[in-house]
Image: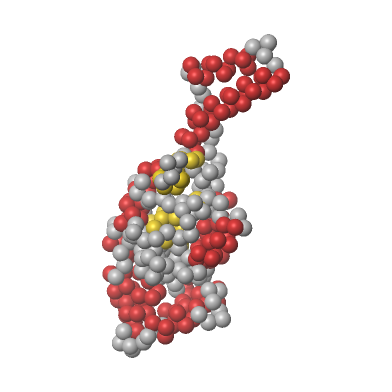
Amino acid sequence: MDANRTLAAENTGTLFWKIFSSSWRLREEDYPLKKLFSSPLGYSYTAFRQATLLYEGMADDQDFDVLCQDVASAITIHPEFVSLLQLVAEQEHVGAVIVTCGLRPVWKNVLEREDLSKTVTVIDGGCIADGFVITAAVKAALVARLRDTHQMYVWAFGDSPLDLEMLSKADQAIVVVGEEQTRSKAMDVALINTIGNDGLRRVRQVVLPSNASPRLDTIKLPLIQLTEHDFVDPVLCRRSRHAGTQILHTTDRNAAKLPMTPMRDVKVAGHVLREDHHCVGQYLATEFLADVVGIEEYPITHVQDHHTRDYRLLQE
């Protein structure tokens, strides 16, 4: 999962330079990172490498650590994410990884404050000695490796166009939507293009805080709540790409015995037999599919001409 404006509403980079620049009375548009990422370099590997050099060149180690502590003290993880990460911490088969372009010391302090530092891994390239930086491509590559090499089922959380490659590689993608004045202005168009090109098939959104307005519409981008059982249970369930076969049967149920009988009757053949196979398939789907796949709420217009919410298969 991403960190800045995903786990928390704040952006650690902006806060860092705001605190550092306070004695210099710099305007926000003059913050070094803002000028860097607004330059022709954009959000390229070179730009992120240059950002690392900016951080390392502005203060000695002791002053840098103090600044990171000050930034961390100004950051509050969304309580919904705290609750979810606490539940993940209780599981042996589920893990949480933060992959961020931000600063590891900041997020380490934030996680320690929530007693999550031992159960949540933070990956960043905020130091030259690390030998790498985190870019959009790196985020996507990490998700792809977890899925394809380690055969893991991956849920990804992000808020900006920089996260779209990562979200596209995940089994389940959750777009975190903040308040309009702080959220990414370019994300709506990027989402429309990515969804339209089938780059995101299993994507939903969560608005944090809950009174924020959603992105796009809730049909293209269904709403979820991080604390609801319908969302939490699938996140915590045990599964992988090489999971063993699960056998479900209804052999002894009276409702199954009725459509089973014609399939064993030698006198039933042709079109009648095909119709009975269809009936059996429909029965099995009705009986089991909702439990196996899961369900989700979505908005509909009621026959009595008012808006309400009903149910469909998860990501149907």
Vertically, is 172 above or below 279? below
- Say left or right for 197 vs 75: right
The outermost residue toward the right is 270
Taking the spot 32% from the left edge, 79% from the top edge, the residue there is: 19
Residue 212 in view, yes or no: yes
Q: Quadrant of residue 44 in the image?
A: bottom right
Vertically, is 163 above or below 46? above
Q: As rendered, which of 247 and 27 lies closer to the eye?
A: 27
The mark total stands at 0
- Say left or right for 168 vs 79: right
**Colour setup of the view:** secondary structure
Taking the spot 35% from the left edge, 49% from the top edge, the residue there is: 227
Vertically, is 87 above or below 180? above
User: How far across and how far down the image is residue 22, in percent?
Assistant: 31, 84
The outermost residue toward the bottom is 24
User: How far across and how far down the image is residue 16, in percent?
Assistant: 36, 76
Taking the spot 38% from the left edge, 76% from the top edge, the residue there is: 14
Taking the spot 37% from the left edge, 85% from the top edge, the residue there is: 27
Screen quadrant of the N terminus? bottom left
User: How far across and how far down the image is residue 282, in percent?
Assistant: 56, 28
User: How far across and how far down the image is residue 128, in percent?
Assistant: 47, 75
- Say left or right for 58 vs 203: left
Residue 121 in view, yes or no: no
